[in-house]
Image (cartoon, rainbow, N blue to C red):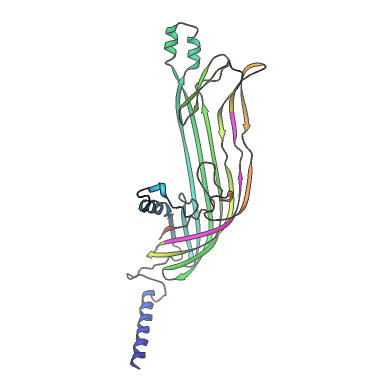
Amino acid sequence: MKKRLTIMLTLFGTMLATAQDLGDDQIPKNKKGNEILPKAGDIGLGFNTIPVLDMILGTLNKATPFSGAGNVVQYTSNSNNQITGKYFLDAKTALRVRFGFNTLSGSMTNQVQDAVAMHAASLGTQDDINAASLIRVDDKLTFKKNNWLISIGIEKRRGYRRLQGFYGIELGVGNTGSTESVSYGNAFSDQFQVDYTSNFNTSQVATQNPTPFGRVTRALETSHRGGFRIGARGFVGVEYFIFAKISIAAEYGWGYAITTRRAATSKREVYNNGQNGPEVLIEEVEVDSKELTKGFSIDNNNGSIFSLNNTLGGNTSLYGGAGALTLLIHF
């Protein structure tokens, strides 16, 4: 009898302690009395912690110590450059948004020999030629890139105390684009040799000579491949509140997307020495074709066309799993 009474008192004490920890309103609180979980009107802001973990895990890898970013672990498709936000309608429902807007612009300048000055000097003395050979003109490349994505959705939650499960759906739209324009210090000529920058990354210089038979082209304006994408994604995940209003969330998703990709176009200057003699002209061409892709995809599907890789050298998959492993702060 005493043993049973002891067990009953122990259970009662446990229930009492639990009730005291939850509080009279059954809201989970920490030992200081602060509410652990978000409530109606709270805002949550988060960022993806995967890049930090990738660096740490790569550095701690025993096979390749201190390899850093060269040994990253890829958990999901790219979400490194997105902001995650939530607004809680109530304790169990939140509106959420993922947003990323990335731009890059700039210019490169390379000097080449002044072709007009050299041609004029060639009609004079050697001193004139020597002086003209020191004169330079600027070739300048200007470029712009943009890449944006916004996803809006609703999230439902349920769970026990610090551990919360969540699920929901979100809609997303995005766009990528990239353009270049070049101004050359020397215009093409059908009368004399012209130096110009053929590769701005290496400052490589090429020569257009009016004597040989054939065509020489160089780009003046280029609009690279880019496109618009739209889709819907369902997601599930789990969130653990390590401190009051501070949590770590992991999620995974599956969705459907449609993406259109524009054809790249180019405006270029052409030197053409054909059967009618040399001439310089400007032409505009499409250098590839348009594309349309659509289909279902899970997160982390980098190898598929449905992952919506952009043309700027990076992956901006619509379904990058922005909450793959996210640190969230609520206030």
Question: Relative to residue 43, is residue 3 depicted above or below?
Answer: below
Residue 211 image offset from top left, x and y in percent: 58, 15
Left or right of 35, for residue 193: right
7 is within the stretch colored magenta: no
Query: Where does residue 179 sit, x and y in percent of width and height?
Result: 54, 36
The image quadrant that residue 331 belongs to is bottom left
Q: Residue at x 36, y 80 (%)?
A: 14
For residue 22, what is the image quadrant? Answer: bottom left
Q: Which one is nearer the viewer's eye here, 158 or 207?
A: 207
The residue furthest top is: 125
Q: Which stretch appears magenta?
A: 248-267
Residue 45, located in which quarter of the rendered image? Answer: bottom left
- Please state the total of marks drawn on the protein image: 0
Residue found at x 48% / y 42%? 103
Q: Up-down: is 238 above or below 319? A: below
Q: Residue at x 55, y 45 (%)?
A: 175
The extreme bottom residue here reads 1
Give residue 321's position: percent from left, percent from top.
50, 55
Report the quarter where the N terminus lies: bottom left
At 61% from the left and 34% from the top, the residue drawn is 287
28 lies above or below 65:
below
Q: Residue furthest front?
A: 63
Is 257 colored magenta in this rendering?
Answer: yes
- Horizontal side of 52 relative to 235 (left or right) equals left
Residue 272 versus residue 264 in the image, above or below:
above
Residue 97: % across, % down: 50, 55
- Which secondary structure is most common in the magenta stretch? strand
